[in-house]
Amino acid sequence: MNPDFIAIKLTDGELKYSHKKSDLGLTVTTKEFIIQKPHINYYISLDAIQSMVPYQAQGRAVRMATSKGAASEVAVMSPGVQHYRIVVRETTVHNRSGIFHMTGSEFIMPLTNEMLMMISKYSGLHAVQ
């Protein structure tokens, strides 16, 4: 686990699944989906998730970089790993500067089948064939 992760202090709901890697942590409770990256956590109410769809990177590995002031974030997507595009109405952001609320956010990230099933089960989202 990355030592730059901010500890998850409070969660809403009962812990159901948690998966941590070197630069990404994902946690599902009965009411929240929490995304941990170094120096920042995103708390997403399962009710705020509008859609989750498979996301395919075009061609080779995709590198995305964003910058805002002195902070920057880089994400790398590799072919062969299933990624999902998650659209949410709102999220609460915890970083080293404080707690903030954002609206209309999108996340692209790898999700295991177990994580996907837990989010689906507790959010009420259903697959469309």
Image: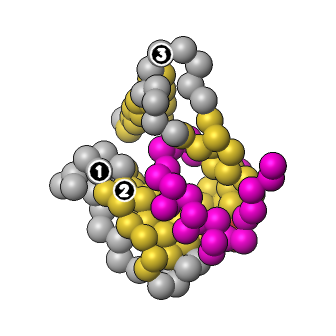
Q: Horizontal placement of 44 versus 51: left or right?
A: left
Please determine whether, in this image, residue 57 is positioned above or below residue 125: above
Q: Count neighbours of disc 2 (C-alpha within 10 A) and say few if under 14, some if 14 to 19, many if 20 or more.
A: some
Q: Count neighbours of disc 3 (C-alpha within 10 A) and say few if under 14, some if 14 to 19, many if 20 or more.
A: few
User: Dot 2 lies on which element?
Assistant: strand
At 42% from the left edge and 70% from the top edge, which residue is drawn? 17
At 44% from the left edge and 20% from the top edge, which residue is drawn? 61
- The kind of residue on which mark 2 rests is Gly
Q: Which residue is mark 3?
A: 60
How many angstroms separate mark 2 from mark 3 (CA)?
A: 24 Å
Q: Count neighbours of disc 1 (C-alpha within 10 A) and say few if under 14, some if 14 to 19, many if 20 or more.
A: few
Q: Horizontal placement of 109 versus 101: left or right?
A: left
Question: Which span of residues is magenta-colored?
Answer: 104-129
Q: Which residue is mark 1?
A: 21
Q: State the quadrant of the N terminus.
A: bottom left
- The kind of residue on which mark 3 rests is Arg
User: Dot 3 lies on which element?
Assistant: loop
Q: Position of residue 116 (x, y in %)?
A: 56, 58
Among the 4 quarters of the image, the one containing residue 127: bottom right
Q: Which of the two residues, 112 or 70, is positioned nearer the viewer here?
A: 112
Do the CB atoms of the residues marked 1 and 2 lie less than 8 Å apart? yes
Sooner in the amino-acid sequence: mark 2 or mark 3: 2
